[in-house]
Amino acid sequence: MIKAIVLLALVGVAIAGPGEMKKMLKKKINKWNWDSKCWGKENLLNQMAGEKAAMDQCSGQTGVATTLPSSVYPVRRLMQAYPGVFASQPMQTNQFASYQPWGQVHHLGKRSIDQGKLIEMAEDVQDFKETWHNAISNLTCVLSKMGYLTTSGDINVSMFQTQFWNKINIGATLAGSDPEWRNMLVTRWTDCYDISQAMPASALLRMMPMMEDKNVQTCRNMVFFKCAMKVKTECCAAAQLHDMLTSFHGPINVDWTQIGLPADKYEMSAMGAMVHMASASPVEKFVHGFFRSDGSDL
């Protein structure tokens, strides 16, 4: 078993390449450090354990990783749309290996289409859609098990407004004990939900063209989670910038609104950091960049 794991790891390195693997590992480490700083290692480990438990439950359920309906299979669509092309050599949609790539050439309009190439392309499209469909189905199952979705498949808004805070140790977070920071994050998560619900169905389906079953609800959920993850990152960044500011300068009792900065201390810290970076001299930027470098840009 260990040999198999090592072999798979080596195959992964060979496919991705050492450079890409290093980038992936760096991204993984940065994400771990970021979340640990914002939410605390204890909460992060509990979250990961919950994900693992949900995945184990979903992988053991039959019918979770479903296949696409036969009506949307590309090969079947081709055979129905161009019966003349396939009439001389009948072929079932699951008998892809039996075709001859040098097979008969048929004319559709002014273009010559090789039957084998048509089926090969349709098979690739079908595989891609099935992989996408199965991934979304399993992700939906995991999100449901973890309470992020309701039984009807909608976003569980109360999870992001109240339940989430009851499931974690707020004291272990960077700013979760501050009602001002919690209110900022909850308000923006609620905005994300309102945005996802307000989008027209036609626009949602254009954003996710591979959603063959026209599941608008799934599209709305994906829009919400994309927005919610972005908001979570921004709020965590604001909390860390505020922590940096107060750690470096100590508590500052100043009415920042008098110089055009936000009244909210976290928003003020984020904007203040951007102003500070923009106003730094070329020498300051060079020296700061040297000491904050990871070595790859020197």
Image (cartoon, helix red, strand yellow):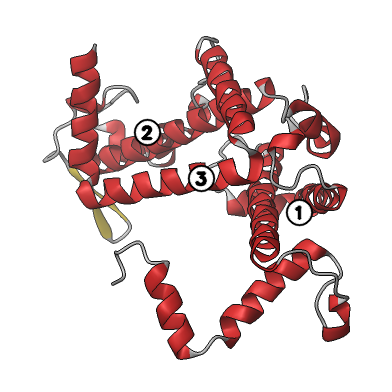
Pointer 2: what residue? 127
Residue 295, image x, y percentages: 30, 64
Residue 138, image x, y percentages: 54, 25
Q: Of the two numbered discs 1 and 3 on the same chain, state the one appearing first in sequence.
A: 3
Circle 3 sits in a helix, a strand or a loop, which is it? helix
Name the residue type under label 1: Pro
Asked if the residue at tag 3 contacts the one at tag 1, i.e. Cβ–Cβ closer than 8 Å, the answer is no
Query: Which picture quadrant has residue 76?
Result: top left
Residue 52 lies left or right of residue 231; in this view the side is left
Q: Nearer the viewer, residue 171 or 158?
A: 171
Pointer 1: what residue? 200
Pointer 3: what residue? 33
Query: Which picture quadrant has residue 274?
Result: bottom right
Name the residue type under label 2: Asp
Marks 2 and 3: which is nearer the front?
3
152 w.r.t. 215: above or below: above
Residue at left offset 73%, top offset 49%? 201
Q: Nearer the viewer, residue 19 or 192?
A: 19
Q: Nearer the viewer, residue 283 or 207?
A: 283
